[in-house]
Amino acid sequence: MFLWIRDQKLLAPIAIASFLFLTLGGVDLILNGPVSLVATVWLCASVGLTRFSPIAAIAAANVGIVVASVFGLGFQFSQIDAAVALLLVAAFASDKNRLAAFIANNVVSIAVLTYLALTQSIQSNFGGVTLSSEQGRVTLLVIGAVAVLSVNSTAWFVGRLLITRITHVGSSLDRAFLEREVASTQLSLAEQDRRFNIARDINELLLQELSTTITLAQSAPYVLKSQPEAAERIISEIAKGTLSAHEHIRTLDDLLQVQLQNQLALPNLDNLDALVVAFREFGFDVGYRIQGEPLRLDNGAQLVLYRIVFEALENVRHHAVPGTAIDIDFSWQDSHLQVLIKDNGEEQRNRAQGQIGQYSFAEDLEALTERPTGAGLTEMVERAKLYGGTVEFARVPGVGFTVSAIFPDIHKFKA
């Protein structure tokens, strides 16, 4: 559910606020009458405003708490909305805003609690508790302040925990990919160990055969002097030993060549899953989608596509803040392929700084008239040209960066 709240920036807070208004607000309406709606509206509005403006959400929550005390409503179930709003602000707002929300909620709540506790008369009912003495008034105030701090602290830490978990902790799918990579690595190591064992056995056989052949060749002159008729047999044995040694050398060479190829294996499209997982572990919200029926390309074409995605992700990692959403889309259609990599790095950075939507006309003009440059971007273009492709870059002010690579005849490079 928290992923849905994160992704639905406008709909989710409104939906949650509406649900709380109907449930908690409905309970307050039954218990306290229509006057309770005055405070309920403010408290629910604080939840609905959390993704639009954290400052406005903080203000609305505190107004709701104050209004409830002004109208003499005491505790309302809708006051739980203030803790929900604090949870969402702690999860999605900037450091400054979430700290301000935590302090403001505690200060206002304790101030209202103090006012109510000090203004209640002895033997009156306060939140279901009867004040029996002045000492009871102080005790009630202390217990209430501790409860307020506990609720707000819990809401704040739960918000930070949830956003940290979905940002920095891999999903079950990520873990499945990593487990598959570990299993694949273990199999590769096992296969490598098997080849080394075979190579060691071949080497021992080769040494034995060469030793036998050398001994035979060294003794041949002495044998031929005493037994000339043994020449044919000796030459045949030497030839046989030499051919066997050659065969073992060829087998050993094949094993070494396979090992070399595995060491020099180039990354391909199958490695993109692991790359996506790695960048999720860096703190980025990476989505990878494939549309259409992929073609099986040769190693060179796969390497180019992999490098384009890799360079785009590295560009985001160097220039964007953690939590940035990155979408990688491969669209296959017959002989055509489009690779689209989009991010919301600027939006996420502005959100962290409390500057959502703040960009100038000059930035719009620059985005339209100036082409982004850089060594990595130039390398993408040059690599794509080798396979008949083009790469375009676009900066969307206030949102982020887009890389679009198009290969109109990618089928020419099928494996």
Image: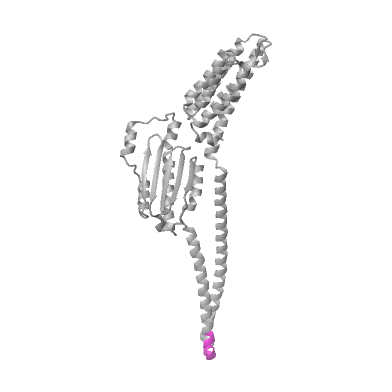
Picture coordinates of residue 373, whole percent (x, y): 34, 43
In the image, which residues are magenta? 224-234
> Which one is in front, 396 or 290?
290
Residue 228 drawn in magenta: yes
Identify the image quadrant of the N terminus: top right
Classify 224 as above or below 346.
below
- Position of 158 compared to 326: left or right? right
Residue shown at 54%/32% (left/top)?
160
Which is nearer the eye, 131 or 75? Answer: 75
- Front-most of 298 and 107? 298
- The C terminus - image quarter: bottom left
Q: Is residue 184 above or below residue 16?
A: below
Question: Does the rendering let one see residue 122?
Answer: yes
Q: Quadrant of residue 317?
A: top left
> In this rendering, is residue 301 above or below 343?
below
Identify which residue is drawn at 45% across, 37% down. 321
Q: Is residue 86 above or below residue 251?
A: above
Q: Position of residue 36 (x, y in %)?
A: 58, 17
Residue 66 coordinates in the image, percent (x, y):
54, 16
Q: Is residue 381 left or right of residue 199?
A: left
Instruction: For residue 152, say whether it is visible.
Output: no
| Secondary structure mostly taken by the magenta-highlighted segment of the chain | helix
Quadrant assignment, res 208: bottom right
Q: Residue furthest left?
A: 369
Q: Position of residue 184 (x, y in %)?
A: 55, 54
How many labels were placed on the picture? 0
